[in-house]
Amino acid sequence: MSSGNHQHSQKLNKPAFTEKQAADLVERRFGLKVSGISLLPSYDDQNFHVHVSRHEVNGSCTKEYVLKITNWEESQNLKLIEVQTQVMIFLNAEGFPSATPYFTKDGDIMCLESIDTDCTTKSYMVRLLTYLPGRTVATISANPPILYEIGKLAAQLDKVLAEKFHHPSVQSLHRGEFIWNLANIPLLEKYIHALGQNRHREVVAHVIQQFKDRVVPKLSTFRACINHGDLNDHNILVDSTAVSSERPQIRVSGILDFNDMSYGYYVFEVAIAIMYMMIESKDPLSVGGHVLAGFESIVPLTTEERDALFPLVSGRFAQSLVLAAYTTLMYPENEEYLMITARTGWKHLVQMYELGQQAVEKIWFDTAKTYLCNEFV
Ligand SMILES: Nc1ncnc2c1ncn2[C@@H]1O[C@H](COP(=O)(O)OP(=O)(O)OP(=O)(O)O)[C@@H](O)[C@H]1O
Ligand SMILES: [Mg+2]
């Protein structure tokens, strides 16, 4: 989850369908018979894991789907959800492991569903997506081949979108002041008070200043593209049989959660992936080199883009940590959930800050260099 709502109370925003209501909805709008349903973890939206019974010529079988009920605020932005879903369909057709929507009885890829809550009626955008196999990267200990593969896939995804994706509403991916776009790091100043007056705030203030001084003037030199924007360890699935076999054939089996897609730059995507892959790593500083090597096997970075990598990875830590602190201040009921990632996140950001750009870059770039003469990739 990197979305997170800062304008509306999460309680008012998040859909609250019961399992029964969700199952009825699948039957009514999609014409499928539900044989099992359970809530999946989610933050802003509501996601259900749905089993449906299908009668086929040679007997019956069960299929699995994810019923995604978009939060109220984003449900108002029809064009944006439409484009996100068309991207998923496009990527799937291009051979990427992304989910695709099951069409409604009316032949649509999504539908608006109204529900009575308290004294008001609210409408939410609903999609039924194919369930993808595998387990999240968060549940495994990501090794160098997986990190390399994730970097490579991130570059392939950005490249194919930049070169081949067309849609009349693609401009809705220019999301202006969308707080999770890495270009908007200076907007964090509005939320930084949530940290109090301490060392963490000092580090974040430094990260924002570095971004203004060193990255903002260079933005126009970076190559633009559409970013997935949230390649975190809960949004990537890996095939479990592949990762446990003796000679691991690494396979990413799912790329999820296109909610945070927006126009950005190639270097943003790799910085975001590096930051999230560092969080649970036992050797966080080495992560960057493996992800970068995979990314550069498809899209080598320019000198200016490479120079921005350190401030961008630090910037993504700052976004995640400041916004988690702000959300905790506004909605203390989420504290436990938000603070789990924060604890390790602060440790990594402070370590990067103390070591400094040159030392960290040396680790990343030296590691990436080893792949150039390594035949197993
Ligand atoms: N198509 C899918 N196939 C398999 N598992 C899925 C699928 N979609 C979602 N999941 C599971 O549900 C979890 C949450 O889904 P998702 O990432 O879409 O929502 P989120 O990050 O909670 O954000 P939000 O609440 O904003 O939708 C994933 O980490 C994954 O475990
Ligand atoms: Mg997610």
Image (cartoon, rainbow, N blue to C red):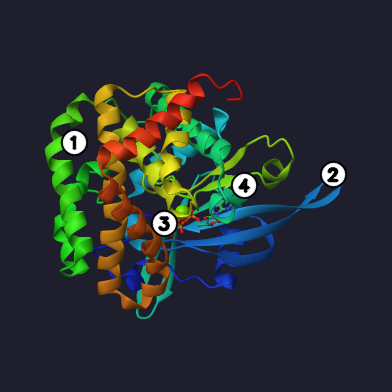
Which residue is label 2 attached to? Answer: 57
Residue count near mark 1 (Cα–Cα under 10 Å), binned few <14, some 14–19, many ≥20 = many
Which residue is label 4 attached to? Answer: 132
Q: How far apart are marks 1 and 3 (CA)?
A: 25 Å
Which residue is label 3 attached to? Answer: 1
Mark 4 vs mark 1: which is more N-terminal? Answer: 4
Which residue is label 1 attached to? Answer: 215
Residue count near mark 2 (Cα–Cα under 10 Å), binned few <14, some 14–19, many ≥20 = few
Q: Quadrant of the N terminus?
A: bottom left
Residue labelled 3 has its Cβ within 8 Å of some atom of ligand 1: yes
Residue labelled 1 has its Cβ within 8 Å of some atom of ligand 2: no
Q: What element carries label 4?
A: loop
Tell me where residue 312 appears, x and y as whole percent: 28, 41
Mark 3 vs mark 2: which is more N-terminal? Answer: 3
Q: How far apart are marks 1 and 2 (CA)?
A: 60 Å
Mark 1 vs mark 3: which is more N-terminal? Answer: 3
Q: Decide if residue 36 is on the left or right side of residue 90.
A: right
**Residue at (65% x, 47% y) in the render:** 133
In the rendered structure, which amino acid carries the disc numbered 3?
Met
Q: Which of marks 3 and 2 is in front?
A: 3
194 over 166 or under it: above or below: below
In the rendered structure, which amino acid carries the disc numbered 1?
Val
Quadrant in which residue 268 is drawn: top left
In the rendered structure, which amino acid carries the disc numbered 4?
Leu
Mark 3 vs mark 4: which is more N-terminal? Answer: 3
In the rendered structure, which amino acid carries the disc numbered 2?
Val
